[in-house]
Image (cartoon, rainbow, N blue to C red):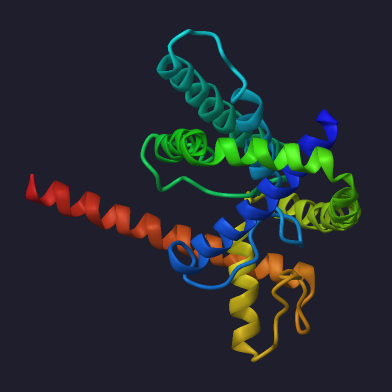
Amino acid sequence: MIILDYLLLFFIGSLVGWIIELVFRRFISAKRWVNPGFLTGPYIPLYGFGTCFLYLFSHVNVFENNTYNLILIVFLSGTSMTLIEYIAGFIFIKFFNIKLWDYSNRKFNIGGIICPLFSLIWYLVSFLYMLILNEGMHNLTGWFDSNLAFGVVVGFYYGIFFVDLLISFNVNAKISKLAKNNKIILSYEQFKIHIKEKAEELKDKQSFLFPFKSKSYTFTDLIDSYTNKIKDEYQIFKQKMEEKRKAKNKND
């Protein structure tokens, strides 16, 4: 029963996380509809694990004082999410040359994988979960334990999820190989946007669910054009830095 409960929580967290990331990219970061994450379907495992940790730590009852317990739970949950984020990001960069997200423009970031701002957000999410959602999630798992017929829906979800996982890792293997051949760390989201821009140039219709598919370009073509774009942007950046350095020396 406990395993089934956590499977349900992972399912809910992954789905809600995907919706949050979708909205975030549309209205804040990319300013367009971009299918978030490295999987095709509506799920982001990072949020699924986060939900499971929140539910797990919500049972912590070390102190007699409830406020102290709440502080401990928020600390454990927020820290766990930061560690999961770092481990997942590090593995993809180290072994696949792929950066699933990029915090390089954030202050005090570590490898562009984690940063204080988003760690603070994880702590805030943990606090809001305990304040608003915790009781409801426990009620939900209680309902699920009494209505195991709903397990068919959860099972159907995991059937699709694992098929998607296999297909997505196959696609990622191709992207990883080309990224290594070009000696670059490929930003997953920026690469998706690049493909979308190339499709718009030729007025090709691009699939939202399959952002790496292109009617007019091969994978190799897309990686090559993305690599050249990165190099051009780096040269422009170097030129601007050099101009600033010269201007500073002149003023001195």
* Vertical placement of residue 74 versus 214, above or below: above
Q: Is residue 246 above or below residue 226?
A: above
Q: Residue at x 78, y 36 (%)?
A: 5
Tell which of 218 and 20 is nearer to you.
Answer: 20
Give the total of numbered labels: 0
Task: Looking at the picture, tell me which residue is in the foreground, 218 or 43.
Answer: 43
Examine the rendering and report whether any part of residue 227 can be seen.
no
Give percent across and percent down for residue 233: 47, 63
Q: Name the residue located 46 percent from the left edge and 36 percent from the top edge.
A: 131
Residue 214 at what x, y percent from top left? 76, 78
Percent across and percent down for residue 165 are 84, 52
Position of 61 with respect to 87 (left or right) is left
Q: Work out whether residue 29 or residue 170 is closer to the camera in this orientation and state it.
A: 29
Instruction: Tell me: residue 74, above or below residue 128.
Output: above
Q: Residue furthest left?
A: 251
| Image quadrant occupied by the N terminus | top right
Horizontally, residue 111 falls left or right of residue 11, namely left
The quadrant where residue 39 appears? bottom right
Q: Residue at x 65, y 73 (%)?
A: 195
Counting from the top left corner in percent of width and height, residue 75 is at 48, 23
Q: Quadrant of residue 222?
A: bottom right
Q: Is 187 drawn above or below residue 129 in the view shown? A: below
Specify whether residue 221 is in view. yes
Identify the image quadrant of the C terminus. Answer: top left
